[in-house]
Image (cartoon, helix red, strand yellow):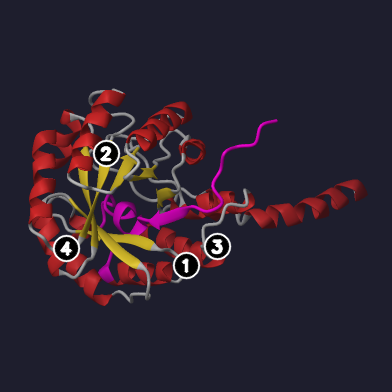
Amino acid sequence: MESLNLPKKVFLKEVGPRDGLQIEKVFTPTNKKIIMCNLLSECGFDDMQFTAFVHPKAVPNMADSVEVSQKIMRKPGMMYSALVPNKRGYINAAAAGIKKVEMTMSATESHSISNLNCNTSDSLRTIQECLDLGLDIKLIVGLAVTFGCPFEGRPKFERITSIVNELNAMEIREVGLCDTSGVADPRQVYDFSSRLIDSFPDITFYFHAHNTHGTGLANVLAAMQAGIINFDTSIAGLGGCPYAPGASGNLATEDVAQTLKYMDIETGLDIDKLIEASKFAAETVGHHDSATLRAGKMNHLVECGPVMQKNNRKN
């Protein structure tokens, strides 16, 4: 049997405090967000996207972005990044001392208009205008609905290539391939990811999965085989896109981290601390979509196996 082409190490960017909370209908208290961020800071992440600088009418749960930015405890050597939808958000994030932001744009015109109230050309122009400001802040781009749009279906690969080519010309060096609606399949993820990596060697691609149809982990495996080693995940499987009808949360960070651990793929994360943070997040919002929180740590199941077999033999 041919061995899988898998990396020895991957990097999980925690997006729970932003993506996980943005869709919640009840405002998450600021002090709870701060505690959540502080717990996550102890888990071993290199990067945590902890808030978004957006208009509070558009995403009410991110209305306290400045206060959260000021009050969280920052661990040395860890990046605390944010999401911004436009130039105003970019400027506000820089003013708050954020050193890395992700600007969202859409792979389709329909989703762009629904999500950002502008077309693709306008989004590209906004990105260039932000870069031209010369601010001390790194800009990466997350390409929403890369694999499937709720309004237009699956974008053609040529459409994705055209957009990435524009970003490459602007010297954007990190681009997210985002399965915003959770409709990608592993073959498509492998195909798109491997071809983009081959075409744009100067760009680091990361994969942002949603688990709407239960294909999230399979898609992560496909992305890894294509050469991607950077992934967005969310504690407790929280999250979703307000402008992608039916989209469920991201893959639960603890589920991905445990799976990778048993595949001998390093993440640098402390599973016990991760579960502690995940439990806090689930208790804060009152729900979760995490196999780990339902079933416990995988090693508990492995350890229980021989005991259960012994008891069964006695019966």
Q: Position of residue 59 (x, y in %)?
A: 18, 52
Please indicate whether residue 272 sits to the left or right of residue 160 in the image. right
Residue type at mark 3 is: Ile
- Earlier residue among tags 1 and 4: 1
Count up the numbered dots: 4
Q: Residues within 10 Å of mark 4 (few under 14, many from 20)?
A: many
Residue type at mark 2 is: Ala
- Earlier residue among tags 2 and 3: 2
User: Residue, x 45% and y 31% (percent of image)?
Assistant: 190
User: Residue, x 22% and y 75% (percent of image)?
Assistant: 70
Callout 4–callout 2 Cβ contact below 8 Å:
no
- Earlier residue among tags 3 and 1: 1
Q: Position of residue 18 (x, y in %)?
A: 29, 56
Q: Residues within 10 Å of mark 3 (few under 14, many from 20)?
A: some
Residue 271 image label: 3
Please indicate whether residue 206 sits to the left or right of residue 307 in the image. left
Foreground pick, 44 / 2 = 2
Residue under circle 1? 43
**Residue interval drawn in magenta:** 1-30
User: Residue, x 43% and y 58% (percent of image)?
Assistant: 282
Residue under circle 4? 93
Q: In 3D space, how far apart are the residues under numbered discs 4 and 2 (Cα atoms)?
A: 21 Å
- Earlier residue among tags 2 and 1: 1
Residue type at mark 4 is: Ala
Q: Is residue 64 visible?
A: no
Quadrant of residue 123 within the rendered picture: top left
User: Residue, x 16% and y 69% (percent of image)?
Assistant: 96
Q: In 3D space, how far apart are the residues under numbered discs 1 and 4 (Cα atoms)?
A: 24 Å
